[in-house]
Image (cartoon, helix red, strand yellow):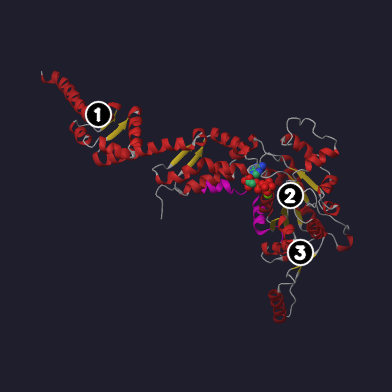
């Protein structure tokens, strides 16, 4: 079914904004990103410089400049270093760990996952994301974390050489700390840490799981048929690990270490003071993470730590103003799917940002306040005549009241349209008349249109008699339609006669 009011150009423009390829990127680089920077023989075609990746990320992510600077640099160095390593003969290689696995610390909804997803998209390497909780819950199962590596191969369409240069992103890493969180078996958590750290360093992971009998048989048959033993192991030495978590409560550990206790927190026993918390978090050290419940060997595999800012009202507002904002563009698409084009007043976005901060879920709060503010419109507008709407501050502050007004307006327009089509007369209403009809409609449980049809059923004939093509309904017309039109006709007749006089004499 096609919608006549739906303009595909609107969609095109929106999609272009949302999924804009980096215009500044040279063609070769764009092409490289599409094909992936790793070729089938394991050669690396990576040419990105830290500042290029940094400015790409800053286009999308708001208020995390410090964290982005570090992450962009370390990710670029990682791939450029791998490229260099490939050129160095085996016997001249530096022995030891060269990887800059990254630990990201920051509260929920501030852009941790978003940053990593953007990076993976930009550089086009296989990418796997998982929650560390997945492993703690299943207990000490050695095979579990290795699934991440096998998943990378899957992401690389079975190309092991590509998978060996992928990125594994583990969220909620703080949930595998063995103390600081009393629920759940500790043995399991430090077990998961140990398994992970093996992968983060260097491990050979079997492509086929030992307990997967079918794949074993399949591999054996394949070997028999082709006479070749296909490669079955993936080396993790070049896989970049990025882990992240909110680490709630770690500020207390840092404060204690710094002897800061509750200085300046007299009125804020909850420790919710965001800016100060960020300052405290910035001083995070390995020893704090160990106190929090990590094995020192595990933290040792994460040489780069970045702390992300908590969002403020202003950050949220800037996120919404950003032309890549997935919240705003997502909502526009929701409405566009009904052929309705949506625009937002800045004041409305500001108000929604203020509401979102109260949710205490970072930028995620934006999603829920948008839903709350617009759900009634999203339900109702598709049934109305309205094809475009400006979302004002009034609408988001008081959606129900504003929707009521919109409905009245739509009702009036609908009636006017019918009247014009059926009788060739444009019927206008003054404000008092509208209010009165609306009151009547409410008390009599009838639509605006029905009330008008009842009140003014004789009007088309009378108005045509006066040869008018436009007529205004006033309060008096609503109160006493018969008398009003009768008087109008008489007055009109008198006026005509007066106008005729000079000519006839
Ligand atoms: N700093 C930011 N700038 C722009 N958009 C952001 C920012 N932070 C979050 N967002 C938006 O909010 C969404 C959710 O953020 P994200 O998934 O990155 O949160 P997170 O930090 O990983 O939180 P969690 O700890 O709960 O996993 C993103 O997809 C993005 O649209
Ligand atoms: Mg996340």
- Ligand 1 is within 8 Å of the C-beta of the residue at disc 1: no
Is 56 situated left or right of 6 in this image? right
* Residue range (magenta): 12-38
Query: Which quadrant of the structure image shows residue 60?
Result: top right
Estimate the x, y position of residue 201 in percent, counting from the top left. 82, 58
Labels 3 and 2 touching (C-beta < 8 A) = no
Write down which quadrant ligand 1 falls in. top right
Of 495 and 107, nearer the camera is 107
Question: Residue 224 magenta-drawn?
Answer: no
User: Compared to 36, does 474 lie above or below?
Assistant: above
Q: Earlier in the sequence, mark 1 or mark 3?
A: 3
Question: Is residue 20 shown in magenta?
Answer: yes
Q: CA distance from mark 3 to mark 2?
A: 22 Å
Residue 340 lies, in percent from the top left, at 45, 44
Number of marks drawn: 3
Depth-wise, is mark 3 or mark 2 nearer the camera? 3
Label 2: element kind: strand
In the rendered view, tell whether residue 39 sits above or below residue 229. Answer: above
- Residue 141's disc is 3
- Is residue 78 shown left or right of residue 435? right
Where does residue 127 sit, x and y in percent of width and height? 69, 57
- State whether label 2 is within 8 Å of ligand 2: yes
Question: To which residue does mark 1 refer?
Answer: 480
């Amino acid at each position: 079914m096609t919608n006549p009011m739906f303009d595909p150009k609107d969609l095109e423009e929106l999609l272009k904004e949302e999924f804009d390829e980096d215009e500044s990127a040279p063609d070769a680089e764009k092409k490289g990103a599409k094909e992936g920077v790793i070729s089938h023989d394991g050669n690396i075609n990576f040419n990105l410089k830290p500042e290029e990746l940094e400015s790409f990320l800053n286009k999308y992510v708001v208020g995390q400049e410090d964290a982005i600077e570090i992450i962009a640099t370390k990710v670029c160095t990682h791939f450029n270093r791998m490229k260099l390593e490939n050129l160095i003969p085996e016997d001249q290689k530096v022995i030891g760990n060269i990887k800059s696995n990254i630990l990201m610390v920051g509260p929920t909804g501030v852009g941790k996952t978003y940053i990593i997803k953007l990076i993976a998209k930009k550089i086009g390497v296989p990418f796997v994301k998982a929650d560390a909780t997945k492993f703690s819950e299943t207990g000490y199962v050695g095979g579990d974390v290795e699934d991440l590596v096998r998943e990378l191969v899957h992401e690389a369409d079975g190309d092991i050489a590509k998978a060996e240069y992928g990125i594994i992103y583990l969220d909620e890493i703080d949930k595998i700390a063995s103390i600081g969180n009393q629920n759940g078996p500790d043995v399991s958590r430090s077990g998961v840490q140990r398994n992970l750290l093996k992968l983060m360093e260097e491990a050979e992971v079997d492509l086929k799981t030992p307990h997967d009998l079918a794949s074993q048989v399949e591999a054996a048959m394949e070997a028999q048929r082709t006479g070749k033993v296909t490669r079955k192991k993936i080396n993790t030495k070049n896989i970049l690990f990025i882990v992240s978590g909110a680490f709630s409560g770690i500020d207390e550990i840092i404060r204690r270490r710094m002897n800061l206790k509750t200085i300046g927190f007299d009125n804020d026993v909850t420790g919710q003071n965001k800016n100060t918390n960020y300052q405290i978090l910035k001083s995070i050290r390995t020893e704090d993470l160990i106190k929090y419940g990590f094995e020192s060997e595990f933290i040792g595999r994460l040489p780069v730590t970045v702390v992300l800012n908590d969002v403020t009202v202003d950050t949220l507002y800037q996120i919404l103003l950003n032309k890549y904002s997935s919240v705003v563009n997502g909502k526009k698409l929701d409405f566009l799917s009904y052929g309705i084009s949506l625009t937002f007043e800045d004041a409305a976005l500001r108000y929604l940002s203020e509401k979102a901060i109260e949710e205490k879920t970072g930028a995620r709060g934006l999603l829920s306040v948008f839903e709350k503010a617009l759900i009634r419109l999203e339900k109702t507008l598709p049934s109305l005549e309205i094809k475009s709407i400006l979302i004002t501050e009034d609408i988001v502050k008081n959606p129900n009241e504003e929707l009521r007004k919109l409905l009245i307006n739509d009702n009036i327009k609908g009636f006017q349209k019918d009247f014009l089509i059926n009788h060739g007369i444009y019927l206008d209403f003054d404000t008092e008349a509208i209010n009165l009809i609306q009151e009547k409609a409410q008390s009599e449980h009838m639509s605006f249109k029905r009330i008008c049809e009842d009140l003014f059923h004789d009007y088309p004939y009378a108005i045509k008699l006066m040869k008018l093509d436009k007529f205004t309904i006033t309060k008096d017309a609503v109160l006493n339609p018969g008398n009003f039109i009768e008087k109008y006709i008489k007055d009109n007749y008198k006026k005509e006669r007066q106008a005729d006089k000079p000519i006839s004499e």
